[in-house]
Image (spheres, helix red, strand yellow):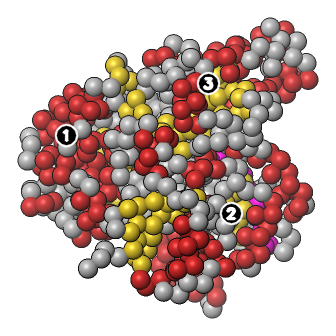
Amino acid sequence: MGNGWILMTKIKEAINPYIEIEGGLMPALHAVQEMEGYISNDAISELALAFNYSNAEVLDVLTYYDDFTLEPSGKHVIRVCRAEACQSLKSKELTEHLTDHFGMSLGETTNDSKITLKEVFCLGNCALGPSVMINETVIGEADKDKVLNFLNDIE
Amino acid sequence: MNSPLKIYIPNETTSNSVGATQAYRAISNLKGIEEAEIIRNGTWGAFWLEPFIEVESEGNRVGVCYKGVDLSQLKTLNDFLSDFDNRDPFDIRKIEFINEQKRIVFSRIGKGNPLDILFYQDQGGYDSLKTALNLDQQNVIDKIKESGLTGRGGAAFPTGIKMQTVSDQSSSLKYLACNADEGDGGTFSDRLIMESDPFALIEGMTIAAYAVGASKGYIYLRSEYPLAKTYLTRAIGIARENNFLGTNIQSSDFDFEIELRIGAGSYVCGEETAMMESIEGRRGLVRSKPPLPAINGLFDKPTLINNVVTLATIPPLLNGSLSDFSDLGSGKSVGTMPFQLCGNIEQSGLVETAFDITIGEMIEKFGKRTKSGLPIHAIQIGGPLGIYLSSRMMSTKLTIESLQSIKGSVGHGGIVVFDNTVDMSEQAKFAMEFCAKESCGKCTPCRIGSVRGVEIIDRLQKNSSSKEDSILLNELCKTMEATSLCAMGGMTPNPIYSIINNFPNELVEK
């Protein structure tokens, strides 16, 4: 009871609007990911129950998509674009500067759970690359300083 | 009374990415700002000038590029206006980059607030829907056929014929699915429509749905476009409030609803059958065709699937721009194409023009030179599955037919420029790496072949004269091409072939 019960109620409320709509599992997964920051085992069970799937079927769908994660991400998610237009403007060097700075590889989270560094393939900001997305903000003509300054501003 | 002073500050991803948001904050805090009206417009698509801020007074509208300028030092509106005047403001509509284009589909971007439905209507918006609702459905389809429009998402299938197929199905329930999963590296034209002229997409969808008899539309938008999501959500709401969506649209007996669905970071979901799987709530695995989606598509119903730009092209075809459009070009390459000039190029942005232009003219007239100042070495056309042209191929025309003849494609119109520091063997390896990362896994040659491809290219990077690896790479590419269900595995070899052929000795020794 207690916290666990409150959490289950929150998950139920988050997925409730999508149960009756066609193909509602995707928007329901988005709702849980947005609310919890990841898709927990409890959420998988709730989703399975709501959509009449087995837990394995829910897992099958969510693991296909990069946006859904089984573990919490850092407080801020930095996505570095690795697609062609950004490559032409040295995104590889930018990626190295960032991985060196944070002392981790793409796909990892800092020990203090503050920063997750990820790759992304195209943010549609190809005219002013290299591009980095921090949470939902895109930074164009990005360099390490611009990224760190932005992080400072939002901290 | 004098018309009030207007200040236009774009609210669009790329403009915001280089400071439009900060400029807006600074300008709205100026003392005396209530004397002026601030309009968050879309972008003009001349991105190297962003953030481009314009001032309109007494009908005269001019602007200035505020890149790298910190406006927070300014105190009053007058401080800003004198700073603005000192920066030699100019009329963006008169620069070569804009006035040498033929903007039919992107005629409104940059001009006003993308969510101002009265502005949209003042600019000719919704005239076409009203025209269409007074026409027989078949008449609308005939006009699209007559226009010569082909799909702008990449496959270039004749739009009118696809509409006819859906229309011919007798099902009482049909769907329209707008593919807004614009995942090709080097493309942003769909995003520009959604962020800078969203009603154009909604109107195009409504006309197409009326023509084929669809009552429900989905927009499948990639999650990497959060601002487009905001714009579309609000624009759909505004259209509904104004009876441009919903029941008895504009007092007709036509009902149509649009629902926005968000992708989750999968490139293959831009392939139409994978997109349908994703909308239905499953893994984005490609389906084999037939059945065609037009006959048996979303939720097993006939479904018209079109890309954003294709749908946004429909309204101009019904409001008097039909002959302007269809008089341009021939074959599959009729009308205008929004090319997206980007990467290492000084004047980057959206170039809507006829297909009949060479890549050399495109660079000379619109892009000018590389951003780095170094010579151009390679140009990729048509996204990750498109080919690389070398600097000796500047006379290549950008028509669908011309690129097809050299095993390339216009695709979604992306043009990515690289200077001479590029390592073409890395670009070849990236093609395979991207395929390995994004393959849905259904076809073995795509899923596993791409991994083997990365390994072979790794070896070739150490020894480019290895005959064995060069033959193996060629055979692997041929297998992927012949045995993959969709373009992901089937066209990944194209950039690699082009690097082997157009860049001798840069991947394999000739």
Q: Which mark is residue B320?
A: 1
Residue A118 part of the magenta segment: yes
Residue B97 part of the magenta segment: no
Q: Amino acid at mark 2?
A: Gly
Residue underneath mark 2: B68
- Separation of disc 2 and disc 3 at Cα? 35 Å
Residue at the (87%, 17%) spot, across then down:
B464
> In the rendering, at what x and y percent does residue B162 appear?
29, 31
**Residue that protrudes farthest toward the bottom in the picture:** A2
Residue underneath mark 3: B387
Q: Residues within 10 Å of mark 1 (few under 14, many from 20)?
A: few
- Separation of disc 1 and disc 2 at Cα? 42 Å
Q: Which residues are magenta?
A: A113-122
Q: In this rendering, is residue B407 above or below B189?
A: above
> In the rendering, at what x and y percent does residue B412 appear?
49, 35
Main secondary structure along the magenta-highlighted residues:
strand
Residue at the (73%, 26%) spot, across then down:
B377
Work out whether mark 2 precedes mark 3 in sequence or the reverse, and give the earlier one.
2
> Are the residues flagged by discs 1 and 2 from a single subunit?
yes
Q: Under tag 3, what secondary structure?
A: strand
* Chain to which the residue tagged by mark 3 belongs: B
Relative to B228, is B208 on the left or the right? left
Work out whether mark 1 precedes mark 2 in sequence or the reverse, and give the earlier one.
2
Q: Amino acid at mark 1?
A: Gly
Instruction: Name the image quarter holding the N terminus of chain B.
Output: bottom left
Q: Under tag 1, what secondary structure?
A: loop
Between marks 1 and 2 in the image, the one whose residue lies nearer the viewer: 2
